[in-house]
Amino acid sequence: MSKLLQHHESTCQVVFQPMGIRCRVPYGRKIMDAAADNAIKLRSDCGGQGQCGKCVVNIYPPSKVSPPTDKEYRLLSPERIKKGDRLACETEVLGEISVSLSKSVLDSGEAIGKSLEGNVFSVDEGRVQSDQEEGASLGIAIDIGTTTLALYLCDLRSAKILSSISEANPQRRYGEDVISRIAYTNEHGDGVEALNSLLLETINAMIAQCLENIGHPKEEVERVTVVGNTTMQHLFTGIHPGKLGVVPYMPESCEAQNYRAGDLSLDVDQNCPVYVFPVISGFVGGDTVGVMLSEKPYQRDEVTLILDIGTNGEIVLGNRQSIWVTSCATGPALEGAHIKCGMRASSGAIEKIFIDPVNYQVHYEMIGDNRAMRPRGLCGSAIIDAVAEMLKVGLIVPSGRLREGLPGVHSDEKGVGRTFVIVPSENGQGLDSIVLTLPDIRQVQLAKSALSTGIKLLMKKSGFNKVDRFVLTGAFGARFNWRNAVDIGMLPDSVYQSDISVVENSAGRGAVMALLDESLRDEIERVALGVHFFELADDPEFAMEFALHTSFPEISDLNG
């Protein structure tokens, strides 16, 4: 038997530290996959493509793994590689090794947001006594976001949410955005099955937890409603999303879908009906329809502009005369992906930033603020804050360039400003400092230009020349400082003249409404069918407007 064949049939011992987890790993298995095999979740913002650099681990001995790849050399210095720092998604196990994992590389799975508490529905938080609920009539509404899953267990008689839960979408292992996940299904024969199984496993665990909270069996669940973007709804129902990744980006069907729970491996009574919302286009899905049901702009005289900003950005504009929608690629950067020190909104993430204009001192607030805890990174709201504050105090010029020579700005050997330090390194070597880089600022420029261009062109196309009511929603949209978004040119100045509402999860609210009142399903199907969809990329003005909107406003304009 050849040495190569022996290797392929053998396994190697790997120890994951600091947990002390010992496991046998097939020879040649990538560390990212080996960790996942043993229920260790590592960050993989780029879907394991070796592009984001968020999965850096330290390996000992370095000689017992595959040689560094070109992608690793682009992201890691030779000195770091020599010390054993490697990308988990690129490195293969070739012998017995120890893999050290920092807190920043671990994906906690924690999900912040998508709560409906304090909004339209009353919430019991699971304190319902079982003798008050005999013969209960239960329903479940599910919101499948690219980043976050939310589930609401409702009493169909009292219209109360009895228990709710949110979790990070486990599919993020294959990429933070839908394009990465579509690519995975195209490149792997079992890709749809793999992503579907991950999703259903987590959703079923969420269902079980909510039912346990109120002490009722799954057989009492009478119906289920589901919203999500078009790709997520395809993957939930086991439909291949390949068509969504190529022109003209059309779904298999735009119509609402009706299933039985057994058809979808949903762990409730197998005959329980499951209603999946209609979609509008490949990138405007059932979640946007849920937003429209929740906010009902089609029943209002005033013109409403709704921004649902998550991993993707959807824009809804109109009133009872007509409703227009479009989508734009804003989310990955604004939710922490594609940003050097970016992360999802979870414990340890900096969420608010203020910079002293006199001494450039950075002040910040963290999620789960614990002064004994060192920040882990920047979530989307902090990224917007940082750019806006840096612009106001002159650390960034309108072109997006960092101003060299100012406190906190570090330049390269050519004298070009490359980074701004938000949280200094503890050891003085800069490896664990939290910074905003020049490429990060460029990502924000692209995201803010996409959104502002989308708003401008949608208003022009629809014929609406003013907005009376402005609604911000979505996992990111409801959490950031919209005033700072106006300051960097992401949102129009006219926002200040509008009636502004911030709603944490309009899509989830829509799913609950359609769950509690089945007659609303006919309403949303009519609305979805009558919506005018505007494809931004097809507009001849898009490229020029996009380029014009990448610059930031002049500093004098911001400071009055």
Image: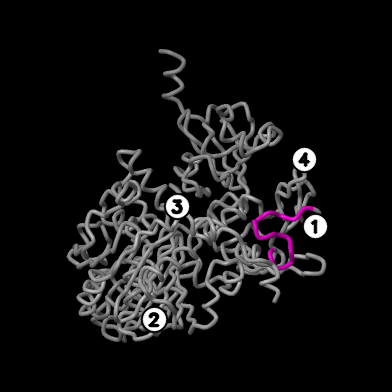
On screen, residue 533 versus residue 334, left or right, reads left
Which one is earlier in the sequence, the residue at label 3 or at label 1?
3
The residue labelled by disc 2 is 303
519 lies above or below 402 = below
Which one is earlier in the sequence, the residue at label 4 or at label 3?
3
Q: Distance between the residues labelled 2 and 4?
A: 52 Å
In front of the other: 465 or 87: 465
Instruction: Report helix, strand or loop for mark 4.
Output: loop
Q: Where on the picture, by quarter, is residue 268?
A: bottom left
In the image, which disc is placed on residue 413? 4
* CA neighbours of label 1 inside 10 A, class few (<14), some (14 to 19), many (20+): some
In reply to whether residue 401 is colored magenta, the answer given is: yes
Residue drawn at (62%, 26%) of the image: 63
Report the mark closest to the observer, 4 or 3.
4
In front of the other: 165 or 558: 558
Point out the residue furthest to the top here.
1
Report the mark closest to the observer, 2 or 3.
2
- Can you give x and y, in whole percent of width and height, for residue 476 in the image? 50, 67
Q: Do tag 1 and tag 2 residues touch (Cβ < 8 Å)? A: no
On screen, residue 445 versus residue 251, left or right, reads right
Q: How far apart are marks 3 and 1 (CA)?
A: 38 Å
Instruction: Report helix, strand or loop for mark 1.
Output: loop
Amino acid type indicated by mark 1 = Leu
The residue labelled by disc 3 is 172
Report the mark closest to the observer, 2 or 4.
2
The residue labelled by disc 1 is 406
Instruction: Report helix, strand or loop for mark 2.
Output: loop
- Can you give x and y, in whole percent of width and height, for residue 469 in the image? 44, 82
In front of the other: 166 or 484: 484
